[in-house]
Image (tube, rainbow, N blue to C red):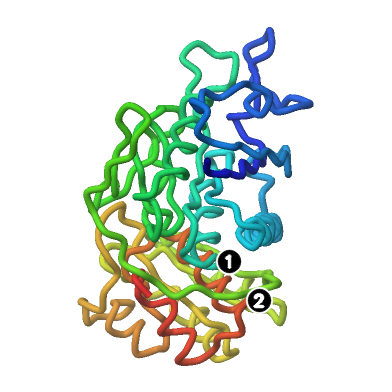
Amino acid sequence: MKTILAIHTGGTISMSQNSEGEVVPNATNPIAQKQVILKGKINLVTDEMFNLPSPHVTPEIMLKIMKRIKKAIADGVDGVVVTHGTDTLEETAYFLDLTLPNTVPIVVTGAMRSSNEIGSDGLYNFTSAISVAAADESYGKGVLVVMNDEIHTARYVTKTHTTNVATFRTPTFGPIGVISKDRPYYFQKLITGEVCNIDQVVDHVYLLKAYSGMESTLFEAIDNPDTNGLVIEGLGAGNLPPQTLPGIQKILDDDIPIVLVSRCYNGVAQEIYDYEGGGIQLKKMGITLCQGLNGQKARIKLLVGLSAGKKGDELTKFVKDAVS
């Protein structure tokens, strides 16, 4: 019989709808209290670690979850399920993917409907996640996100709809597998990546989104001694309005690493265009173009790299490719 650790952290999956129709946190997690149909094959150990709406989750909270999972792995657990609010679920999942050894299955799940709403998906997703975490086929797949009968890699999955139960999608590549009758089926292989062993997280790593007519004002505000890094969601294939360049150059001159991704839903940032503010110029200036990650994921990767003490070429190599 396999032992699966369920770490509950809060979010909609742990909330209920009140008489006014407002979704609010409960004193205790209703999912943790319900009996999950495990068919006598799984020993489920529960840890109600946090009870936080996901906008309250910080990298420091992610670090605590990671350390709890490491302890569980050392104690011989066969798999881990983390329940989490969906707003920042993809960031926590990717943080865990970057910082935990690729040994036992680790699955993150949540819900789009609270526990007492009609069509609540929380208990179903939780049960599916347990099935995935307990399956032999799930070993060596990295951290997985299970929602709505689909299995996604933490690296590429993102929330795409504010309320739809099918909100989690993997642009370009699609899910790595599906769930049918409590059993996972995998159709893609995971590209392995580097894992960073960290015991603390740096702060003041920022994310800005580029827009038409953007100037240097926000970059000038970020350029201060406390800033450790910046990710920019650039235009198109990785370009920026020329008015931003003076502020960006000043940040680079102050040895603050800048990572550029595209604000587009699909595709990668590349040095294609050779004009003022184009990707070719940005790369020559010293900006790292990260391929394949969205802004929030690139920020997590930059933050983890900095927390691991990486700098210069080592940090650039770690951040630039989504497969590293």
The earlier-in-sequence mark between 2 and 1 is 1
Q: Which mark is residue 60?
A: none
Element class at badge 2: loop
Q: Is residue 59 at all visible to an observer of this figure?
A: no
Quarter of the image for residue 212 reads bottom left
The outermost residue toward the top is 19
Residue 24 in the image: state x and y as whole percent: 69, 24
Q: Quadrant of residue 180?
A: top left
* Percent of width and height locating residue 249: 49, 85
Q: Which mark is residue 227?
A: 2
| Cα separation between marks 2 and 1 | 8 Å
| Quadrant occupied by the C terminus | bottom left
Query: To which residue does mark 1 refer?
Result: 206
Query: Circle 2: is it few (<14), some (14-19), or many (20+) Cα within 10 Å?
Result: some
* Mark 2 in CB contact with mark 1 (< 8 angstroms): yes
Q: How many marks on residues? A: 2
Element type where label 1 sits in the image: strand
* Residue 307 vertical placement versus 151 (above, below): below
Amino acid carrying label 1: it is Tyr
Which residue is pictured at 50% across the width and 39% down the height?
109
Nearer to the camera, 76 or 285: 76
303 vs 233, nearest the viewer: 303
Q: Is residue 25 left or right of residue 99?
A: right
